[in-house]
Amino acid sequence: MPGGLWSIGGMSFPTLIPGLRGPSEKVAGLVYFGRMVDKVRLAAEGKLPEAWEASRGTAYPNAFDNRCCRFLGIDYAAFEKRVREGGRDEDLLEWAFEHGRRPGDEEIEIWNAFMTKLGWRDVYTERVDIRLGEIGLPAGTVATMFEFIDLDEGRLPLPTA
């Protein structure tokens, strides 16, 4: 991947979106939340790919934004409105705790483990393999959705044969 973009099967990678954190990056110990914040901010600035708009928020029951909102017990539309008002990530997470629920340390540990492992020997395995195929890579190149996202967005180097 030296030098940035590469092409596989006529598609260019990685999907480079400046200002978008990886899914494993934590805000106050919680994975994915910062990425969801970034997606709202980028959408407000018109910098999120148009194809991503349909999957933001709660459009799909198993989409990660939806899962995060359910975990925190918050309404996505209210969350999006709050993010657009501005503030630090920690303040936005505190807002989520106040308007939804404040999970305990063990619940956050379980959330983090669950989210970071989705795709590894579970119902998401097929989805990971489908997404890999969409970008021209063989099944099993990565094992989880978080790894796929990081690969697709250039944070994880392309495996060598």
Image (tube, rainbow, N blue to C red):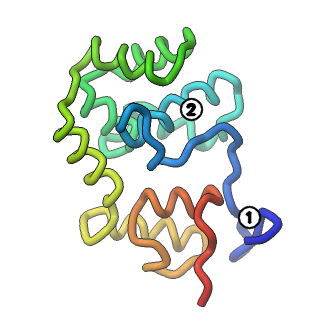
Q: Residue at x 47, y 12 (%)?
A: 82
Other residues around mark 2 within 10 Å, as few (<14) / some (14–19) / many (≥20): many
Kindly give the residue lying farthest to the bottom in the view shown.
161
**CB under 8 Å between callouts 1 and 2?**
no
Mark 2 residue type: Asp
Q: Write down the quadrant of residue 70 in the picture.
A: top left
The tag earlier along the polypeptide, 1 or 2, is 1
Quarter location, residue 137: bottom right
Residue 71 image label: none
State whether residue 63 is above or below residue 5. Answer: above
Q: Is residue 105 left or right of residue 74?
A: left
Query: What residue type is disc 1 on?
Result: Ser
The residue lying at 76 percent from left, 70 percent from top is 6
Q: Is residue 92 above or below residue 32?
A: above
Rendered-image quadrant of the N terminus: bottom right
Residue at 61%, 43% (x, y): give it. 51
The residue at 52%/57% (across/down) is: 149
Q: Quick one: quadrant of the C terminus?
A: bottom right
For marks 1 and 2, give the one nearer the viewer: 2
Q: Position of residue 33 (x, y in %)?
A: 42, 34
SS under mark 1: strand
Q: Nearer the viewer, residue 72 or 108?
A: 108
Q: Is residue 60 left or right of residue 36?
A: left
**Quarter occupied by residue 86:** top right
SS for dot 2: helix
Residue situated furthest right in the rendering: 3
- Which residue is disc 1 drawn over? 12
Q: In the visual, does 143 lie left or right of 72?
A: right
Question: Is 37 rendered above or below residue 135?
Answer: above
- In the rendered image, residue 111, in percent from the top left (x then y), is placed at 25, 44
The x, y position of residue 140, in whole percent, is: 43, 79
Residue 38: mark? 2
